[in-house]
Amino acid sequence: MFRSKGFGLLKLIPLMSGQPNLAYKFIHPAIASHGHCCHRRSVDYRQRYKTCPGSAGGRTLSAPQTKIMAEEELPGVLILDVGGTHGVLEDLAALLKKHFRLITMKEFIENKKEMSKKIQSVFVFECRPTIDRELLESLPNLKVIGNSGVGVDHLDLKMISNFGVKVTNTPHAVADPTADIGVALMLASARRLVEGCQITVSPDTKYFAVDWLGVEVTRATLGIIGMGSIGYKVAQRARAFNMRILYHNRNRRKEEEEAVCAHYCEKMEDLLQQSDFVMLVVNLTPETHKLIGKKELGLMKPTATLINISRGAVIDQDALAEALQNKVIRAAALDVTYPEPLPRDHPLLKLNNIIITPHIGTATVQAVRMMAEEAIANMLAVLNGQPIPSEVFPK
């Protein structure tokens, strides 16, 4: 559905003190040199960073020394809201305020005439706000839509491009946490952790059955469908378990396969037939919609587990429910479904050989901050006429 430019202009530097768990922060020249682009103004908008000892690697960052522009001088960014059920997290809103004037949808709707002229960018967080033709027509000065996250199947790229608006995403911030959740689901399903927890805490449990068994991940065969940055990260982690790694991709990735000792399967069917665990790590496109259906599930081993960390619509969920009920495959573990959440009476919710998590692949304190920083770098690059780190193009 899309292709994204490399993030070569970004450099990695250690994070600020007080955040030891986040190893790196993305800084793009657009942020560092924003003051230069605004040289006609009387304020200095550049961020200065200084190093100090005490972090892993011997360097960390002190808080940025920033002189903030008067709010009315900052470019406007449209967001759904701050806080609440669907709004931008307050910590992320604070990051955005360093570079933009925040305009919520409520403020925009209440004063369209004035606000429409100020908005030059839209920050899309958790697929919100919805970008439709009506909104685009009402924003004459809009230049960029900065998506927080890598997936852009919720955006009509061709329509947006027709308005002369650029779209960016954040592929580099999502790879590690999403790979982590894939491996976590594989382990949890293999060792039946959710069931085990339920048995342990149940008031009806009198003893632990000796025949309650899981399967091992170590030395098993993992089939990865989609060897992009996330798929590659999954393979790196799988090596620690001495797994045999197979992968299927539109194009063979020789450098990556050599690095993780993976074997390329030109036909997806070959991968399905050999794998003990099949992990889906693909973008949702017309070609990957219901990529896994009844036929594909029938090719898998009866002892195999299907794991999905991509998009829910990549699987025919009715076919999956039937396969799990009839023991065509052993189990499934999904971080994504379609829709999200599933209707409360959906057949998948009634099965005990499936784990479903609420789309938490990037739901970490570190990842959401890094995605916001990456999105900010992208949006500022567009507004300043600089090379764009992660632009997404219509196919």
Image (spheres, rainbow, N blue to C red):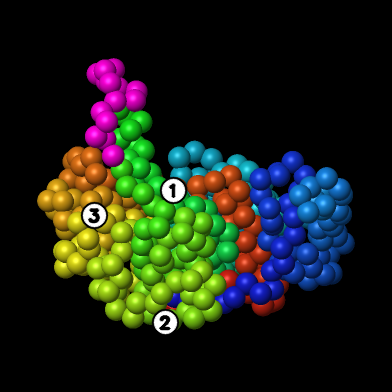
Q: Which residue type carries mark 3?
A: Thr
Q: Is residue 206 magenta?
A: yes
Q: Nearer the viewer, residue 202 or 316?
A: 202
Return the mark for residue 325. none
Label 2 sits on residue: 251
Label 1 sits on residue: 184
Q: Tell whether 77 sits left or right of 386.
A: left
**Could you give the CA–CA distance between mark 1 and mark 3, rounded to whole angstroms?**
19 Å
Q: Is residue 10 magenta?
A: no
Q: Tell whether 274 sits left or right of 70.
A: left
Q: Nearer the viewer, residue 158 or 176?
A: 176
Secondary structure mainly formed by the magenta segment: loop
Please name the residue shown 53% across and 40% down the image.
Answer: 83
Q: Start and end of the magenta stretch?
A: 200-213
Image marks 1 and 3: residues in contact by CB distance under 8 Å: no
Q: Which residue type carries mark 2?
A: Asn
Image coordinates for residue 82, horizontal then vertical, percent? 55, 43
Image coordinates for residue 187, horizontal then vertical, percent? 40, 47
The disc, 3 or 2, on the residue closer to the chain's N-terminal end is 2
**Could you give the CA–CA distance between mark 3 and mark 2, rounded to whole angstroms?**
29 Å
Numbered label tally: 3
Q: Nearer the viewer, residue 349 or 93?
A: 349
The quadrant the N terminus occupies is bottom left
- Disc 2 residue crowd, few under 14, some 14–19, many 20+, Cα 10 Å: few
**Could you give the CA–CA distance between mark 2 and mark 1, rounded to whole angstroms?**
27 Å
**SS assignment at label 2:** loop
Image coordinates for residue 251, horizontal then vertical, percent? 42, 82
